Amino acid sequence: MNDTLSEWTIEKFLDMRKEVLDKQKDLEKSNSEIVKKIENLSNEQNEKFDSIQSKLNEIVETLKPEVASKMEENNDSAVILAPVDSTRDVQKNEEMMSTSGKYFVLKHTFNNVSSIRTGTHYYSEEEEHFGVRWQIRAERNKDFLSFWLWSLYYKKTEKNWKIEVELEPKIVSLGSSGKKEKRRRKCSIVFQSDPMKYSWRCFKFVEWDELEKEFVVDDCFCAEIAIKVKKMTGIYKENLRSFDNSMKECSDVVLIVNDEKFYVSKLYLATHSSYFKTLFLGKFNEAKKTEIKLFGIDEDDFQNYLEVLYGEQAIDDYTVEGILMVADMYDTSLVIQKCESFLLKESNKTLKKKLQLSTRYNLPALMKQCLGEIKSVADIKSVLPGDIHDLDPSIMAVFLQRALSLHNS
């Protein structure tokens, strides 16, 4: 009886052991299948991510601010907008444009509106941006306000040149009841060396009666033109160095800016730029790519930026602002320092322009030099922007202190 029980126990134990081993094998097989499924799923997700990333890049390129709807110059339509606080979409659009590429806003307050005569031009102060001087002009065209934008580069040269821009003009009321504005829709314009194409004009921007009723406060109104420079031809110097296909053997990556290819070294750019160091050496898909598209910059500015980075003397009064913009975007201290040194020692730019660049790109030595040259109330007035609200608060405090000191002396 005991032997039979013992045999039964052993047999039962062996059956249980076999069952456990079978279950273990099934579990291992199941785990293996799960791991394989996870790996397949991961690969599928990576492929989907790469596909989505590719589509996003295409969308970004399509939606770049450089893309502008064409508009005939004789289309005088304009749009009344609600007080600025409620126009969130408009604000977002302007903020987007202001952070990419060659974007700036001209502002001027036209005074003594009641004395403006038909057929007489009234001018803003000239402003220089990216090596070119610009000016707003207004005229009473019988029952309408006419609006002009002039590119004054023709005064500098007799050679052929062309500047392609997207612009958006508007007038703004300065009333205490809220900021009201009327603007013309964005349009694409080409300024060039042809005397008939130095300027852009909107003949009937707003009816004169509407201007006086809705936008004139204390006998004045403010005019603004937002300008996005898309391409400049015949303005800059000739290229000092090639980054084209002839440099292919010496490069390991191609950077593409507006369809122009630049053959460069990843390691060299990564050495001088924290942006490119992260892009090329970080854990991004771009680190493995041989061609990468860059957005929000001009190919000529990138050419000049690379020339400075590679040791060429590419900085002058026409190129310095564009180079600074690219160097700031890509956090390239060497290039920024060279630009600041040029502005300190060689540049013929106005004190006002140098001060603007010093605040925008955080150039402390240049700012110190500029503030040191402001020694009178007239000097202070000469560097004030068209809209006082555009002045950096820290600079405003210095000006106030300087004005008080001059008043008491």
Image (cartoon, rainbow, N blue to C red):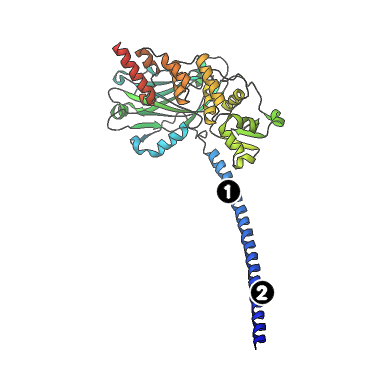
User: Disc 2 on helix, strand or loop?
Assistant: helix
Q: Residue furthest right?
A: 249
Does dot 1 land on a helix, a strand or a loop?
A: helix
Question: Which residue is nearer to you in this view: 348 or 97?
Answer: 348
In the picture, which quadrant includes the C terminus? top left
Q: Amino acid at mark 2?
A: Lys
**Which residue reaches farthest bottom?**
1
Give the x, y percent position of residue 372: 42, 14
Seen in the picture, residue 174 relative to 46 is either above or below; the reply is above
| Mark 2 crowdedness (10 Å alpha carbons): few <14, some 14-19, many ≥20 | few
Q: Position of residue 266 (x, y in %)?
A: 64, 33
* Frontmost residue, 313 versus 369: 369
With 219 as the anchor, is 134 left or right in this view? Answer: right
Q: Position of residue 147 (x, y in %)?
A: 40, 24
Which residue is depicted at the point 60% across and 23% down? 308
Say if residue 108 shows up in the picture.
Answer: no
- Residue that sits furthest to the top in the current view: 409
Q: Which residue is mark 1?
A: 49
How many numbered discs?
2
Q: Is residue 286 left or right of residue 210?
A: right
Q: Residues within 10 Å of mark 1 (few under 14, many from 20)?
A: few
**Between 191 and 173, which is closer to the camera in this rendering?**
173
Question: Vertically, is 19 above or below 367?
Answer: below
Q: Nearer the viewer, residue 36 or 183?
A: 36
- Kindly identify which residue carries mark 2: 18
Sequence order check: which comes first, mark 2 or mark 1? 2
**Percent x, y of residue 289:** 64, 40
Q: Residue at x 29, y 12 (%)?
A: 408
Amino acid type at mark 1: Phe
Q: Quadrant of the N terminus?
A: bottom right
